[in-house]
Amino acid sequence: MDRYNDFSVEDFVWDDFFRQWTLSPTPETDALWDDWIDANPEMLEKVEQAKAIVLSLRLHEPEIGDAEINQVVKQTLGRITEAGDESARTSRRLIPAFSIPWMQFAASVALIVLLGWAVYSVTIRPDEKPQLGQQNGMIEHSDALTEKINSSSQTIEIALADGSKISLAPKGRIRYPEQFDGERREVFLEGEAFFDIAKDTDHPFLVYANGLVTKVLGTSFRIKAYGDSREVTVEVKTGKVAVFAQSDPHLKEKVADKQLQGVVLTPNQKIIYARNEVKMVKTLVEKPEMVVSKAEIPQFEFEDTPASDVFNTIARAYGIDIIYDEALLKDCPLTAHLDNQTLHDKLNIICKAVESSYEIVDGQVIIHSKGCRN
Amino acid sequence: MNSKSSFPEDRVLWQDFLAGEVRAFEKLMSDNFRLLFRYGSKFSKDRELVKDSIQDLFMILWEKRDNLSPDAAVKPYLMASLRRLMHRQVSSRTWVGGEALQDEDDYFEIEFSVEDDYIRNEATNTRTLQLQKLLNALPRRQKEVVYLKFFQELSRDQIAEVMAVSPQTVSNLLQIAIRHLKAHWKAEFLIFFLLHFLF
């Protein structure tokens, strides 16, 4: 956050992270910015002003009603299904059954059912879709679950039968079976918890939390799924984690598969799942840590080193992808000592030195540079 | 640089669409209609033309679904395709001698407005109005980049795909636009303040 210390109102207005906080704040970003403002009270006025500007500046967009959209969609659908009949005719040669009258009748019934379903799925909003409750039902019936609620003010440790450990944050609630005897190890979370899961590749471990499914084979990660927040976040510390929405049309396969399907997260990556919009954004955790063992931590001391080599060293140490234009950056020499900075500070310093900037897209660091030709 | 769609739901829907599922067609079109309508309206003021273009777009995609990439990032792909389609339409109509919809095929109309509910003091109000004026006066391509980046929240690569230019061009346009906005904005604000206090 230090890079904001000398920001002007103009800088804030066009800063991605600031805009994100202003336009769709989350408990995490709120906390981060509030802390920063507490530490830099002189910036409060600028922040307030920039916030007002970002919020008030609107795009004058033409409006179109749902009914109007629906009408065009229905009309288009009519046209493509007409065209579809032609292709059905070609397939008729292969499958004579379709020419039998009752089959046509059955097809009409199927079409009506399909249309009915389509109307249903359009009118039902995503947040009204069956949530966790129903989904749990089937599993809970077969096997009574143990429930732990942390009403204390400290994190509590829970040991599971398979050797996994869960650190449940205050106000968290977790349900799990005494023994895992199915093909999968499944638990249900509300609130925040850190998971350290014992490795068992034959029995994937699944956490269900506010509509998001997190699936692992053996690893450690943190989930925040507060009941009153519209977002669920998953941050990976070690190993690999797959996440997908509970509303995913391929949920069953993804749950059953021994492989990790869906959005796969690696260490230092984090996913933010917006429940109502059913969308996921991959990014980096707030304070990425190095993934290599202590002995392997490289020296971040560079003496006239090409910036491309510097980025490679950092990428390896933090286990993240840094994407840059090799041709442009190999001619940018850098001299710097970066042993004690956080990842973001390291990147900021390098970017300043070689006149570049960086952004985080899809859990990767992307360097924007125009090269150094001097 | 390959920017994969970060929204797995979109991707599943897109793949079902390519597999020929009518339900996926309907959902894909309904979900993206408003976005495409708004974007399309930047190229023509004719509502019906914009609606027709979106309909044409989806029918074309449906017809050639066997040849489309299953890994496309859906939103930028749809926007890019609509943009191409509308540019072609507008220029072909001009060519046939029909009523040209807009003078140029490089027409891009957006208007920024100020919602003053959020503004509590005069200085902020003045600043916002100045920014609005500067934004509305930006050259067309810079305006489009600012629109796609800050109001559609597309990434640099996605913008490059939509506008059919290189990612580097996107960065350059964006940088020029923001630098221009920041510099002029500050200058105008200072002048305003000087005038305000001196007279």
Image (cartoon, grey):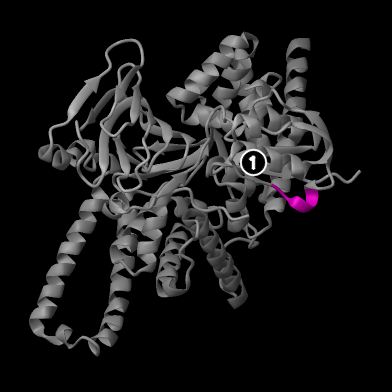
Q: Which residue is mark 1?
A: A316
Q: Which residues are magenta?
A: A324-328
> Observer-nearest residue: B188 or A232?
A232
**Place of residue A253 in the rendered image (x, y in percent of width and height, measured from the top left):** 29, 55
Question: What residue lies at 47% left-to-right and 57% top-to-bottom?
Answer: B74
Within 10 Å of disc 1 (Cα), the crowding (few <14, some 14-19, many 20+) is some
Return the chain for callout 1: A
Question: What residue lies at 79% left-to-right and 37% top-to-bottom?
Answer: A355
> Observer-nearest residue: A322 or A183?
A183
Question: What residue lies at 82% left-to-right and 36% top-to-bottom?
Answer: A334
> Can residue B112 be found in the magenta stretch?
no
Q: Which amino acid type is marked by label 1? A: Arg
* Horizontal relation, residue A29 to residue A131: left or right: right
**Place of residue A45 in the rendered image (x, y in percent of width and height, measured from the top left):** 61, 13
* B2 is higher (above) or lower (below) than A235: below
**Place of residue A308 in the rendered image (x, y in percent of width and height, measured from the top left):** 75, 45
* Horizontal relation, residue B169 to residue A290: left or right: right
**Place of residue A326 in the rendered image (x, y in percent of width and height, measured from the top left):** 75, 51
Disc 1 secondary structure class: helix
> Observer-nearest residue: B90 or A133?
A133
Question: Is most of the magenta stretch helix, strand or loop?
Answer: helix
> Can residue A326 be found in the magenta stretch?
yes
* Horizontal relation, residue B58 to residue A267: left or right: left
Where residue B195 sits, quadrant-wise, is top right
* A101 is higher (above) or lower (below) than B119: below
* B5 is higher (above) or lower (below) than B150: below
